Amino acid sequence: MVSGLARETIRLALLEDLFHGDVTSLLLVPEGKNAKALIRAKEDLVIAGMPFVREVFLAIDSRIDIKSFFNEGDEIVKGAEIAEVTGNARGLLAGERTALNLLQRVSGIATMTSAYKKLVSDLRVKIVDTRKTSPGMRFFEKYGVRAGGGDNHRFGLYDGVLIKDNHIRIAGGVRESVSLAKKTHHLLKIEVEVRNFDELREALETGADVIMLDNMSASDMTQAVKITNGRALLEASGNITIDNIRTIAETGVDIISIGALTHSARAVDISMKIV
Amino acid sequence: MVSGLARETIRLALLEDLFHGDVTSLLLVPEGKNAKALIRAKEDLVIAGMPFVREVFLAIDSRIDIKSFFNEGDEIVKGAEIAEVTGNARGLLAGERTALNLLQRVSGIATMTSAYKKLVSDLRVKIVDTRKTSPGMRFFEKYGVRAGGGDNHRFGLYDGVLIKDNHIRIAGGVRESVSLAKKTHHLLKIEVEVRNFDELREALETGADVIMLDNMSASDMTQAVKITNGRALLEASGNITIDNIRTIAETGVDIISIGALTHSARAVDISMKIV
Amino acid sequence: MVSGLARETIRLALLEDLFHGDVTSLLLVPEGKNAKALIRAKEDLVIAGMPFVREVFLAIDSRIDIKSFFNEGDEIVKGAEIAEVTGNARGLLAGERTALNLLQRVSGIATMTSAYKKLVSDLRVKIVDTRKTSPGMRFFEKYGVRAGGGDNHRFGLYDGVLIKDNHIRIAGGVRESVSLAKKTHHLLKIEVEVRNFDELREALETGADVIMLDNMSASDMTQAVKITNGRALLEASGNITIDNIRTIAETGVDIISIGALTHSARAVDISMKIV
Amino acid sequence: MVSGLARETIRLALLEDLFHGDVTSLLLVPEGKNAKALIRAKEDLVIAGMPFVREVFLAIDSRIDIKSFFNEGDEIVKGAEIAEVTGNARGLLAGERTALNLLQRVSGIATMTSAYKKLVSDLRVKIVDTRKTSPGMRFFEKYGVRAGGGDNHRFGLYDGVLIKDNHIRIAGGVRESVSLAKKTHHLLKIEVEVRNFDELREALETGADVIMLDNMSASDMTQAVKITNGRALLEASGNITIDNIRTIAETGVDIISIGALTHSARAVDISMKIV
Amino acid sequence: MVSGLARETIRLALLEDLFHGDVTSLLLVPEGKNAKALIRAKEDLVIAGMPFVREVFLAIDSRIDIKSFFNEGDEIVKGAEIAEVTGNARGLLAGERTALNLLQRVSGIATMTSAYKKLVSDLRVKIVDTRKTSPGMRFFEKYGVRAGGGDNHRFGLYDGVLIKDNHIRIAGGVRESVSLAKKTHHLLKIEVEVRNFDELREALETGADVIMLDNMSASDMTQAVKITNGRALLEASGNITIDNIRTIAETGVDIISIGALTHSARAVDISMKIV
Amino acid sequence: MVSGLARETIRLALLEDLFHGDVTSLLLVPEGKNAKALIRAKEDLVIAGMPFVREVFLAIDSRIDIKSFFNEGDEIVKGAEIAEVTGNARGLLAGERTALNLLQRVSGIATMTSAYKKLVSDLRVKIVDTRKTSPGMRFFEKYGVRAGGGDNHRFGLYDGVLIKDNHIRIAGGVRESVSLAKKTHHLLKIEVEVRNFDELREALETGADVIMLDNMSASDMTQAVKITNGRALLEASGNITIDNIRTIAETGVDIISIGALTHSARAVDISMKIV
């Protein structure tokens, strides 16, 4: 089941790539010709996004058939056949690039997330994404994070209260901000960003559910964990890399959020060849 | 002037991030309150995308005012103020993330393109993008390539005939493919992908305008340039990196296409702070 | 600031009422003629929705001017002038019905909510809405509840985990359901519906944040409050009326949700007359 | 056959409720799991809207199967099974609320209309709706009126000329208005609102097809019927209730229009339970 | 005031012509450059559609200014300046073709309608259009008919009952069809197509409001007018040309409908030149 | 395979004609009734557009079945059965007019194109269309040109560089314009409009790929062909008619573009009758 939001992105992506038609296939590929294509991994990767590949092809021609050979989130080695796509040849070529662009990006995110996650999988820390996503692609990118073993932060501005420095500046402080935020509906938790131990204590006293430690050093985080002592969840944020994630995780924070999972993941290499 | 296609992406991106509203600002920011925010570079970068930042904020509130301090494509140093955004504080916060996501991605692409371009700027070779873009974001990403000093390949399946291996397999060969393609409208050129010198010669004999050398070694490219002898443009494609681009450019090819410019550029770090 | 979602509804509502044009005004009203109209309360009511009235008229003609004489949520007596609308006469007539339909419905919801709220305003209980809204109108209807002094429950299926009987039947029990739900993102709370004290205890032991007491008698609710003893928020749901709301509130539950606020509120009577 | 307009509302309603996904089902309901649900009346009602329930579920998943056990417009007793919905369990839960919101509202309108209609069913008077509908829901609400035995007034501003007080004020009188309106296309009739017998006579002399008696007393309506003597249809409008509809009908008017049928009908109680 | 329906067509037309951008202007026209263009008649014509030209340019750039030198429906001689368009040069070139396509088509229809109308202007017969319009352009094309002195038939399938041969075949005859149609809402008239005098009499007896004489000879029409004797409006339809319109009008029919006004009008020649 | 752009036009066309429903069929045609209809040529014509007829009916009801008896581009004689449409009778009537409007227009264009083409079919000249199309209908109209044996010019402002008089005026001359245009992407050719032999020579020297001879006399064109001597393609444009096309073709130009093919083609007569 693909959401209405996701369908809008697929519609837009196909419009962008196909618009009034594929001038090359129109000339080279006979109208009724059928073909079979193989989607194949050209490097080791974590596969994610095949349900969207299916949606792309079905949006073009509802008779195209897709067989996937792996489960979402599976680790796949270079050269493996990921899926087989059968149907009208013009339809296959019309969807190829959009399908691959989606699949390469989502799998790239899953692959990167998985690499981070493995470094801390023995700890109970959650690796989560941010809202730093490609405009229009958030649904797909956050799906890739989950497929790679990560967790999601809130989806948008409406499914979680997250008080950041800009809000605090306007509202007049951490305490004032958290207090005002308590008016939100009863199924949303409140998270607040803090820069130092004073703000952390304010946040704890006012009853924030989650506290974001913004760009703190690992040693400060360790201290923050002690001060908090389980009264709130702690989220480490800012400048997390593959090199320092273990150190940060070991400070005892509950959540590590990494913008790079979605804004800077490299697309993995996947091809689709007619056979 | 922002195209209708670009406006559709911005509409979708705002829907995705804002949907029915920003629950945090609704509680913390008084309705009529105005504010000023600064957009600032947090690393050295090539700036690109400010016209789209403007569109994002205007789509939210037509009275928001944006002053840019640089021209598109300018090189900016860490810490520099890029722009000032003034207006309704809720509007500023509502647009912040979508605007920055766009700006960071487009500037990231411009920055990466510029780095590649500089390595070959004394040569007449063109650095171009591909259709390996984020679904829905092609307009913005190809703009970023131009802002960074690169050139664009075709935009989609409709503004250039590009015969790839899948087409050749269906049509029955390079010669047959190029011949069929000549029926296209008289303002489109024909490009064909070749894997070896035999196919190159076929392509030249049939009168292809541009020939893509797919994953050839640098020495084979040098040989291809000789064989071609100016009868067609040559495009090097596949596995181009910052390390080998100079070598490839020196083979004498006319165009180097790099998928990574759009599918794997890292977002550069840019912040927006209310002051 | 009106959300993108709200704008889509206004666009659809105008399409529905106006479509290709107002055949009556086209014949009876000279093209350039300007007019002034008064929006007036025809019964006592709580006013809510004027920002949307503004959006409706601006969507038709950006030069129409609207002056409101009250704040959202104000109590207004029969006969009072609510607003003055000035501009092109055809534009005024084109927007009249859509604007009034919105205003009468949203104010009707605010008025009903306010009536319920007043009966319990000395208690700390929250009066909240449900997802039983008019399709396409949820944004406006939930706004009306807030304007009338109520609070909102979650907006849709994505901004809060609410485990109802259908989920419990599939997942195999309250305990199993709540446990599974804990995987949700860290800014969402978990609410579960229970039918008896056994399920209530299960929910408490598994750590549900909010517990919905479905169609319980007031005396059972009182007992549930004792059992819960502050370990979770309790929401009373089902068959709440103006007659029993006080009794239910006095059981000590934290939240009372009332579907009728949005699915069965009577539109209040408001007119718009050209003067 | 559901119109394009209706499909737009369903799309918007699903976007509003589901947006990027149902976070509860995602966690609690296994992906491939199928289920069967029963839709059941929880009070006596006139059923209407099942074709739209079908559209809602098909928009989510084209393999969901719906069996209806009644005809549109049937009177149903409390407890009766209305329909059976079978298919993917996540799909069933995703569509449940939107489907029920539509069905409860449309059936509520049919039920209310039927109650009014029964009181005058021995007379030849028509009970009709108005344009006082929920924005975006007019198609469905007017359908509910027909299903309940009522008739429709015009759908929007384009399928009938209806001259109201605001037009008359601008055009300069009933006579002038009706004369100008005669230029409309030859398949539209002309209706004009009158407040007294003088205006009624003007309308008759100018050849109006239908005359709306605005907020007249029953005895004045009786007199108006006499004056008119079959030269035009007469529509009673304003403040019609279940208590006075019989009296008004007995005055001999041809049409009674009731805004409350659509703007203030109570949603009837209908549930959907997985079995 | 341009309807929502018309705006959708303009949006689609601009997407179709401009899509991601005008590659020629992007290279040849400096970004900030302003220009003035003159729209000029290149043949004698009746001008219609300038409000839509305005909408096209405003949709591209809200600062473009348009001055019209004529009223809609004016007769213009070859060479006359119709309007002046001033603003951003890229914007002018981006809108030029779409604006002219609209203007040439709508003016072409006005010009053709005017030619027909003049031949019968001393008679009280109405010249009307049909639903044989260019898909998506009906609003504009029916406007052109009015601007040329004609009248409109119904706009679509929803604003008038028109019983044609296909309906009659299904319903079982003219009498049965008209009777069933009387259930329609009270502001719609009923028109029925007849092929001979028997059917005409049936239609008159059943009380049709308008009767379409389908492809009858002029002498049969004269006879039909006699038989009808004012009891219904008569519409002549089928094979009306500039050569026979006078003869047909003189039969005494009330309405002559001409599909060619919209489906086969020649676009008139209008140019836009930067000065 | 019908493009996303084409689907948007079909959606808009059906909205325009059907909107909330077909009031005639609703009353006269029983809901479940099936019917068969024949689409028939009422004059000699070249048939084109049946795939779009199919799309129209499928958009209404996916169970409607269409059998075509000819290939696109076939010459058909008056009276021939073109296709058979079977399915729900209301669905057939709902789609009839939109389907025929499309088919009559596209076939009309194919028929006109074929007539022009036949006059020059022994020569190697191409007959092409322009961007002078009905707004929103370009995809369909350019398809009709191809079906009639013509070729397409560029589709829009993005798939070919075409430098016209307005650009030349801004850029400062033919030479300057062509030079600037060479920066376009490497799969687009450059065409420039010239008014005299001096400009022709400038265009040739600067390396334009295609040169448009704007409104030149046939003898000047003959001279232009000599001057050009194969160095560029020559396109004759302006005032081409059925009477002068042979003369122009014999000048030796490569391409003749004819705006009338799309802006002024007469719709051919095609009917659809229920049998």
Image (tube, coloured by chain):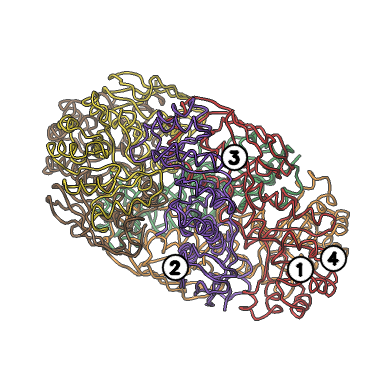
Chain colours: A yellow, B brown, C purple, D red, E orange, F green
| Crowdedness near tag 2: few (<14), some (14–19) or many (≥20) residues, C-alpha within 10 Å | few
Q: Nearer the viewer, residue E50 or B197?
A: E50
Q: Amino acid at mark 4?
A: Arg
Q: Nearer the viewer, residue F163 or C219?
A: C219
Q: Is residue B42 left or right of residue F73?
A: left
Image vertical order of residue A64 relative to residue F83, above or below: above
Image vertical order of residue B69 relative to residue A37, above or below: below
Q: Is residue A62 left or right of residue B125?
A: right
Check the residue under mark 1 and report the chain it is in. Answer: D
Horizontal and vertical percent position of residue A144:
33, 32
Can residue F245 be seen? yes
Residues at marks 1 and 4, common chain?
Answer: no
Residue E231: mark in rendering: 4
Q: Residue at x 34, y 65 (%)?
A: B32
Horizontal and vertical percent position of residue F246:
50, 50
Mark 4 or 2: in front is 2
Residue D209: mark in rendering: 1
- Mark 3 and mark 2: span between their CA atoms? 40 Å
Q: Amino acid at mark 3?
A: Glu
Check the residue under mark 3 and report the chain it is in. Answer: D
Check the residue under mark 4 and report the chain it is in. Answer: E
Mark toward the start of the polypeptide (1 vs 3): 3
Q: Nearer the viewer, residue C52 or A184?
A: A184
- Mark 4 and mark 3: span between their CA atoms? 45 Å
Residues at marks 3 and 2, common chain?
Answer: no
SS of the residue under disc 1: loop
Q: Which residue is mark 3?
A: D55
Q: Quadrant of residue B117?
A: top left
Q: Is residue B36 left or right of residue E133?
A: left
Residue C71: mark in rendering: 2
Horizontal and vertical percent position of residue C189:
38, 39
